[in-house]
Image (cartoon, grey):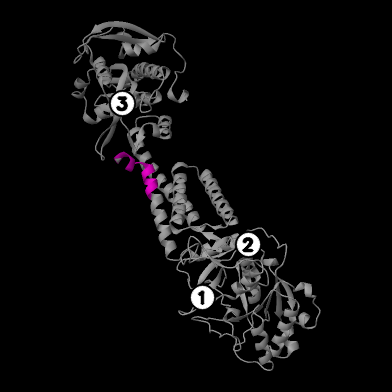
Amino acid sequence: MHVFLRSPLAAGFLISTLVFLGIVTVRNTGSLESTELAAYDWQIRLQPKVPESKSRIVLIEVTDNCIKSQGQWPLTDGTVNQILKILISYGSRAIGLDLYRDMPIPPGGDELGATLNSNPTIITTMKFGGDREIGVPPPWMLKNPEQLGFNDILVDRGGIVRRGLLFLDDGKNVYYSFALRLALLYLQAEGIAPQADKSNPQHIRLGKISIRPLQPNEGGYVGADDRGYQFLLDYKHIQSAADIISLETLLTGRIQAEAIRDKIVIIGTTAEGVKDFFYTPFSRGFNYDQQISGIALHAYIVNQLIRVALARDSPPQTLREVYEWLWILLWSLLGGALGLKVRSPWKFAILSLTGLLCLFSIVYGAFLNGWWVPLIPPAMAWVISAAVDTAYMANLEKRERASLMSLFSKHVSREVAEVIWKQRSQFSYGGRPRPQKLIETVMFTDLKGFTSMTEKLDPHVLIDWLNTYLEAMAKLVMDYGGIIDEYTGDGFKADFGVPLPRITETEIGQDAINAVSCALAMDEEMNRLNTHWREQNLPTGNMRIGIFTGPVVAGSLGSAQRLKYTTIGDTVNIASRLESFSKDSPTPESAQSHCRIFIGETTLFYLGNQFKIRKVGEASLKGKVQKITIYHVFGRINPQPTEAKLGDRS
């Protein structure tokens, strides 16, 4: 568990979770509400425009020209009574009077009252009002409360109407909305009456569909006005929800009865001076006319309620809050996974955009199937989580690279360092090489007679002489793919086959060949250095090298402040003993060589017939119970113009 908590995966999960919590917190303050509602409007505008096959509603518009021709506003009670009698004679199924009659407007008040009270298919209006609006009482002459409906409209912050109302109450009585009254009159002829939902009697059901009341924090809303019984408007068929007839056309008899018969008729004003207009999700476009009239909005709400009952076309549904949280968390985790896995900026940008397109496709597909699924919070979670995890991984990799390069870059070639970095997952964990068992070839070197040399030379001359020697030999080790993991004064230890594990016998064998080739190259380099030192009247040197191939344990030792990558094990000990074996005993080839190279039998196994090798014999090395067969390498059988090095074996 501790290992998991230190892993990038755990850190990425934690980052994604924190991003999720942050976005949910910001969302709960209402800061994202306007953006989420705008995204909902966008989906409404994108939904396919399917016209109604049959118009059920007719609007009788009182325009500016109508008011001018009538000579006054409001219309008199007598004019309203004349309108109602014409519509009744034409056989309308329901009549909605969206003109306030809270006080007499003579002449004709008594006649209007008689018409209203004798025709239950006529629905009149009142207004509850609120903090910023003044309420309007019911018609003064109305006796039947079932012919009354409120025409209050819920307007969101920003002025957009996205919700409809079915019921309101004043603490004593429950009132029906104007649109619901008209829809129920129409549905009554279809044999449909409102019922309580079987699973929740508090919910109303029209036909087979229950309308669940919208809660203050559902969809994109946060702390919305929750008065009454609310539902979401889907704005389907908004362009064809009703036919439109002007009042002048009706009063002059230029309309056929078939245009009115068996339909819902709503009478109201569209005059600019009356200011009965509202913004909808379609008002965000570039059209000149950005508003719709109040009667058009009521007509649309009536149309949607009828579709619910007859076509089983449910209003948009919202997810429960816990499911919205899980949805946002999912995209935060997906964004975190993207940030953890993708390093290429171009690939990251392409996948980020692809993810956003997938998110929108899912959300829009859900909307077309009747569900309002959040878009903005998961999109933010996807982008922010991906960006933060990417920044975290970039910083982690920077630190890991610095840590790894501090261990290896000074001791290996640039090519090897890049290979180590690219394949760090094979051996690195948390910026430190993970301990591992592997097969490698170990080399130990030492200078013969160095102790006596230190007594003859001045300190600065000695250090310069030694640095020249070590720099030349270290370069050869790096050229042949080795790593120097330890300096011991005048000698060093080199590893061939770390830190990347060798899997095949061919790879293990190549490391052994590289180590022996490097030793022979050191012999040539020692000869060149001795020539140079003689010219400067400086001491010359001879080397001893021990090489052995076998299993080791590789890893980093030390504290966090002083970390060192090294190898340990019996193979390392044997290589060290081979280097120091018979320090002062000359070999038959010593006169032609400045470097004595001893190898073990395991190394010999991988060399094939490439080198000149002489068996020295079996010997008991210091600290070893079993005898070791020792071989002396003194040249190549077929010298190559350019020997294979790591850079040539990629």
The magenta segment is: 2-14
The residue closer to the viewer here, 17 or 406, is: 17
Instruction: Say if mark 3 contacts mark 1, CB within 8 Å.
Output: no
Looking at the rendering, which quadrant does residue 560 occupy? top left
Q: Tell me where residue 592 appears, x and y as whole percent.
A: 33, 9
Q: Relative to residue 155, is residue 451 drawn left or right?
A: left
Residue 119 shows up from this direction: yes
Q: Tell me where residue 352 appears, x and y as whole percent.
A: 52, 48
Q: Is disc 3 placed on a helix, strand or loop? A: helix
Which label number is shown at residue 45? 2
Q: Is residue 587 above or below residue 191?
A: above
Q: Relative to residue 510, is residue 257 drawn left or right?
A: right
Q: Residue at x 30, y 27 (%)?
A: 554
Q: Main secondary structure of the magenta part?
A: helix
Q: Amino acid at mark 2?
A: Arg
The number of numbered badges drawn on the structure is 3
Q: Tell me where residue 252 appears, x and y as whole percent.
A: 80, 83
For label 3, the residue is 470
Query: Which of the two discs, 2 and 1, labels the residue nearer the N terminus?
Result: 2
Q: Residues within 10 Å of mark 3 (few under 14, many from 20)?
A: some
Q: Is disc 2 placed on a helix, strand or loop? A: helix
The residue closer to the viewer here, 279 or 559, is: 279
Q: Is residue 457 above or below residue 95?
A: above
* Alpha-carbon span between mark 3 and mark 1: 92 Å
Q: Is disc 1 placed on a helix, strand or loop? A: strand
Which one is in front in this view, the residue at disc 2 or the one at disc 1?
Answer: 1
Q: Amino acid at mark 1?
A: Leu
522 magenta-colored: no
